[in-house]
Amino acid sequence: MIEKFEYIGENAGISLLILAAVHGNETAGTIACRRLIKEIEEGKIKIKNGRLTMVPVCNPEAYRRDVREIDQNLNRVMHEHANPQNYEQKLANEICPLIKSHRILLDLHSTHCEGDVPFAFCDYPDEYNQKLIDGLDVGYVLEGWPQIYQNQSEIEDYSTEHCAHEYGNTATTLECGYHKSPAAAELAYHAILSTLANFDLTAAPKPQSRAKKHIEMKNFVIKQRAGQLSKAYKHLDKVKKGEVVARYDDGEELTVAEDGYILLPNLNCAVGAEWYYFGSAK
Ligand SMILES: [Zn+2]
């Protein structure tokens, strides 16, 4: 059973859902939610309009063990399961109704490597999405995620953003930086505050919009067998056409087809999972 915290403003307004620790070891958003819950309960922050719901830990067992998932990636099974087969599918059945009943979702994640640059995903651009992203203190926006999953069908894309979109709602995933970095928790906290102000749930001043670079995702690589990335890439490292970015232990080399960026490299990737993504500036 997931724990949720709901705050209803005096006046009508928009409904906002904040999710954290969909991946159990991504705790920046959890720290941020708990900080905000304390401040709301102490009366330091007041929800004036609309409705705010926060789920500080979406995957409690993975959170307890400090791992990404128990049986399956929760952010690939986020739809309603008539016959849930495992722990994450049961969690999805609890979380989907919340996504359905909130007009806007901010899903807080973090990434694998120390020094990773924060960024936002914009999978299904619409007016609310742009407003949400404009208020976030990130320099990069990644677009085109649903398209690459459509094109490469090895893994189904039942993400939180996909789920919100299916219900006619708006979602953005915010990657706050390295999992255990205090700066990531700070960024997550300010992202929530900015979103509350931006959508008039609080009376705080609206956040300043920061210039953002938009990157179009082109493809991803599933790790097929034992191998390694050719160096300790960081998310958003520039790569050149023909650069060898990974090597399988049997000698096969993986190169990139054009100049661009390596995205979400996973140095400790398990066989069968997404190893890295590639994209280029729009
Ligand atoms: Zn994540």
Image (tube, rainbow, N blue to C red):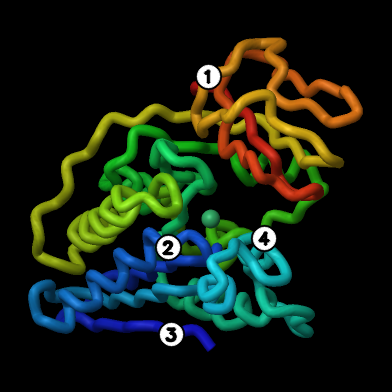
Label 1's element? strand
x then y, percent, for residue 207:
17, 47
Q: Position of residue 143 (x, y in %)?
A: 52, 37
What amino acid type is highlighted by mark number 2? Thr
* Residues tagged 2 and 1 counted as in contact (Cβ below 8 A): no
Mark 2 neighbour density, 10 Å: few (under 14) some (14–19) many (20 or more):
many
* Residue 45 to residue 269: above or below: below
Please give the name of the residue rendered at 56% of the width and 82% of the height, measured from the top-left corner.
94
Left or right of 238 on screen, residue 182: left
Give, as a three-letter code, the residue at label 4.
Arg
| 153 relative to 280, above or below | below
Q: CA distance from mark 2 to mark 3?
A: 15 Å
Q: Which residue is mark 2?
A: 27
Determine contact: label 4, label 1, CB under 8 Å: no
> Which image quarter holds the N terminus?
bottom right
Q: Position of residue 26 (x, y in %)?
A: 48, 59
Q: Which residue is mark 4?
A: 76
Q: Name the kind of residue labelled 1 in the image.
A: Lys
Eyeballing the image, is 178 above or below 22? above
Q: CA distance from mark 3 to mark 4?
A: 21 Å
Q: Which mark is residue 238?
A: 1
Q: Residues within 10 Å of mark 3 (few under 14, many from 20)?
A: few
Q: Are marks 3 and 4 in contact (CB under 8 Å)?
A: no
The answer to which of marks 2 and 4 sits earlier in the sequence is 2
Horizontal side, residue 70 vs residue 35: left or right: right
Q: Earlier in the sequence, mark 3 or mark 4?
A: 3
Among numbered discs 4 and 1, the one appearing first in the sequence: 4
Q: Secondary structure at mark 2?
A: loop
Left or right of 87 on screen, residue 142: left
Mark nearer the viewer, 4 or 1: 1
